[in-house]
Amino acid sequence: MDEQVLRAMARWPDVPAVWGWLRLDRRGRWLLVDRGRPGFDEGRDGAGSPITNPQIADFIGRNYAADEAGRWYWQNGPQRVYVDVEAAPLVLRVVGTKPQVRLVTHTGRPVARVDAGWLGPGGEVLLRTDAGPAVVHDLDLAALAIDEDGVDVVLEIDGRRLRLAPTDSAARSLGFVATPRP
């Protein structure tokens, strides 16, 4: 976390957390859900508006973490802002070409290890990594070595073959809370 955030947390330790106004979509975009805006309609505005300022997106990414309950949040100074997660708390981009690919989170953290994998109900590739629970960005799936071996789907990564077990719940399989609330 940024030094200024750590100082703010020490100075104001009891700032209440906020819930339901920051989202992460399945492509790693931060979205602001302004429920307090006049005329807000959950059906129309509930998905949120993209945060397009690169400095703000980088600040959120540098100060993004999980609590012990598997709820992901952005530490905004002294205030913890819990994040609604569309697919997984981390979105992985693929760098390089087969078979020498590397994975990097949407926050810029390199992934050193993949421990397990699943195939989600929409065909998404879900991975448990040393960086945390993640989904591979859908535009990068073609850059991975994925084989359909009869019944199994197998991902070749880090010089090994990883069977992707089917799952109907990314949150349950990866161990995170998709919509944290108090």
Image (cartoon, rainbow, N blue to C red):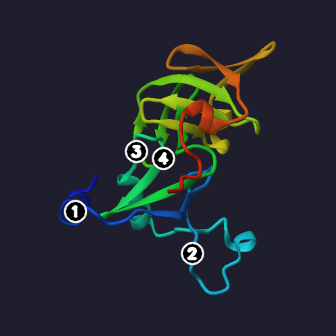
The kind of residue tagged 3 is: Asp
Secondary structure type for disc 2 = loop
Element assignment for label 4: loop
The disc placed on residue 4 is: 1
Residue 76 location (% of width, % of height)? 35, 63
Above or below, 149 relative to 64? above
Between 69 and 132, the one lying in front of the other is 69
Return the disc, 2 or 3, that comes first in the chain's sequence. Answer: 2
Q: From mark 4 to mark 3, how far is it between C-alphas?
A: 6 Å
Whether residue 11 can be seen here = yes
Q: Which of marks 4 and 1 precedes in the sequence?
A: 1
Is there CB contact under 8 Å for labels 1 and 4? no
Q: Residue 138 got which mark?
A: none
Please identify, in this view, whether the residue under mark 3 or under mark 1 is nearer the observer: 3
Residue type marked 4 = Arg
Cβ atoms under marks 4 and 3 closer than 8 Å: yes
Q: What amino acid type should be assigned to the residue bearing mark 1?
A: Gln
Q: CA distance from mark 1 to mark 4?
A: 23 Å
Q: Position of residue 36 (x, y in %)?
A: 56, 80
Secondary structure category for the residue under label 3: loop
Count neighbours of disc 2 (C-alpha within 10 A) and say few if under 14, some if 14 to 19, many if 20 or more: some
Q: Is residue 83 above or below residue 108?
A: below
Label 3 – label 1 distance at C-alpha: 20 Å
- Residue 71 image label: 4
Kindly identify the residue that appears in the image at 56 percent across and 55 percent down: 84
Q: Label 2 to label 3, Cα distance in Å?
A: 24 Å
Identify the mark at residue 67; answer none if there is no mark.
3
Outermost residue toward the right? 150
Instruction: Name the residue beneath numbered marker 2.
Output: 34
* Real-space Cα separation, disc 2 to disc 1, in angstroms: 26 Å
As helix, strand or loop, the secondary structure at mark 1 comes to helix
